[in-house]
Image: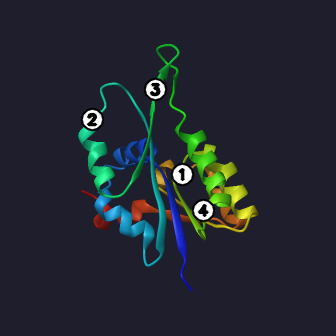
C-alpha cells in the first residue's frame, strides 16, 4: 500500500527552536527525513518575512521543492508583530484534508496554535506526525499523543539533520 504524505512546516518556529538548541536544520536532508519511503503530495514552508528578508535563503528552499508561503509582517507597535503563519498552516492542512489525497499530515512546529489542526485531522481519519524540537514543543501538542498524534523529537537527530 502506498502511503501519501503532506508536509506543513513553520519555518520561523523551526529556525528559532533550532537556534535555541545550537544547530540549524539542513533542509536538503530534512525533506527525505520527513517523507521517508512515502509518496510526497505537498511540501509547504510557511514563514513571516520582513522587507529585509534574504531572498537567497528562500530560493534555495524553492529549488529543493518546498512550496513557499511567505507572509509580510504587520507591525502594530514595537512589541506586537503579526505574521499569519500559524493560522494559515492550520487552515491549509484542514482544507487539504478534503481537497488532496494524503494519508499522513506532517506538521513541523512545536507551537500550541496548531493543536486544532492536529485534532481535526485526526478526527477526519488522517494520521498526524508532529515534528518539533523538544525544547520548543508545547505541552498542548505533547498531549495530542493521547488522541493519536505521533510526536517526533528532532532534537535527537542533530548529527543527521544539521548543517
**Disc 3 designates what residue?**
73
Relative height, residue 114 to residue 103 (above, below):
above
Answer with mark 1 or mark 3, whichever residue precedes in sequence. 3
Question: Closer to the observer: label 2 or label 4?
Answer: 4
**Disc 1 designates what residue?**
137
| Mark 2 surroundings within 10 Å by alpha-carbon count, few (fewer than 14), some (14 through 19), many (20 or more) | few
Relative height, residue 6 to residue 79 (above, below):
below
Left or right, 26 with respect to 41, comes to: left
Answer with mark 2 or mark 3, whichever residue precedes in sequence. 2
Q: Which mark is residue 63?
A: none
SS label for mark 4:
loop
SS label for mark 3:
loop
SS label for mark 1:
loop
**Disc 2 designates what residue?**
54
Marks 2 and 4, Cα distance to the nearest angstrom? 31 Å
| Mark 1 surroundings within 10 Å by alpha-carbon count, few (fewer than 14), some (14 through 19), many (20 or more) | some
User: Split into 4 quadrants, where in the image is the N terminus?
Assistant: bottom right
For image coordinates 32% across by 51% down, the residue present is 61
- Looking at the image, which residue sits at the far top? 77
Q: Which mark is residue 100?
A: 4
For image coordinates 32% across by 55% down, the residue present is 25
Answer with mark 2 or mark 1, whichever residue precedes in sequence. 2
Marks 4 and 1, Cα distance to the nearest angstrom? 28 Å
Marks 2 and 3, Cα distance to the nearest angstrom? 14 Å
Discs 2, 1 touching: Cβ within 8 Å: no
Where is residue 162 drawn, in percent x and y?
28, 59
Where is residue 141 drawn, in percent x and y?
62, 53
Question: Closer to the observer: label 2 or label 1?
Answer: 2
Amino acid at each position: 500500500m502506498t502511503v501519501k504524505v503532506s508536509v506543513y512546516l513553520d519555518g520561523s518556529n523551526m529556525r528559532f527552536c533550532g537556534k535555541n538548541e545550537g544547530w540549524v536544520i539542513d533542509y536538503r536532508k530534512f525533506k527525505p527525513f520527513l517523507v521517508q519511503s512515502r509518496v510526497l503530495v505537498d511540501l509547504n514552508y510557511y514563514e513571516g518575512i520582513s522587507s529585509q528578508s534574504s531572498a537567497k535563503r528562500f530560493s534555495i528552499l524553492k529549488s529543493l521543492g518546498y512550496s513557499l508561503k511567505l507572509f509580510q509582517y504587520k507591525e502594530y507597535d514595537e512589541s506586537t508583530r503579526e505574521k499569519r503563519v500559524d493560522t494559515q498552516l492550520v487552515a491549509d492542512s484542514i482544507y487539504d484534508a478534503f481537497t488532496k489525497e494524503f494519508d499522513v499530515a506532517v506538521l513541523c512546529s512545536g507551537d500550541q496554535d496548531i493543536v486544532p489542526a492536529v485534532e481535526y485531522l485526526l478526527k477526519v481519519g488522517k494520521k498526524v506526525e508532529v515534528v518539533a524540537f523538544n525544547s520548543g514543543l508545547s505541552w498542548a501538542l505533547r498531549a495530542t499523543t493521547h488522541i493519536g498524534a505521533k510526536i517526533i523529537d528532532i532534537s535527537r537527530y542533530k548529527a543527521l539533520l544539521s548543517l
